[in-house]
Amino acid sequence: MKIETTCDRRKFIKGAAIASGLAALLGLIRPASAKETKQPLPQEESNKGYRLTEHIKKYYETARM
């Protein structure tokens, strides 16, 4: 009876080694990527950067000590 259980253990260990090797190989494969999306339209230059507006001026006045 021990011979049968030993063979089963060996089969199990071989199967586990093969499964872990396959899992490692599958981890190296890149997944399919989606098609490239269109670039968003560039926004107007006036919307970029810092602008000193009325509500910012009011904040500066209240933050002064």
Image: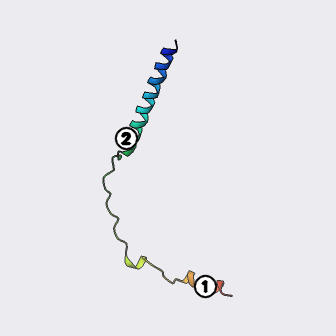
Q: Position of residue 39 (x, y in %)?
A: 33, 63
* Few, some or many residues within 10 Å of mark 1 (<14, 14–19, 20+): few
User: Three-letter amino acid code at disc 2?
Assistant: Leu
Q: Position of residue 6 (x, y in %)?
A: 49, 19
Badge number at residue 22: none
Badge number at residue 25: 2
Residue positioned most to the right: 65
Q: Which colour scheme is used?
A: rainbow
In the picture, measured across the screen, residue 2 lies left or right of residue 24, that is: right
Taking 26 as reference, is 44 above or below it? below
Task: Find disc 1 in the rendering and name its residue.
Answer: 60
Given residues 18 and 59, the one toward you in this image is: 18
In the picture, measured across the screen, residue 44 lies left or right of residue 2, that is: left
User: Three-letter amino acid code at disc 1?
Assistant: Tyr
Secondary structure at badge 1 equals: helix
In the picture, measured across the screen, residue 7 lies left or right of residue 42, that is: right
Given residues 51 and 4, the one toward you in this image is: 4
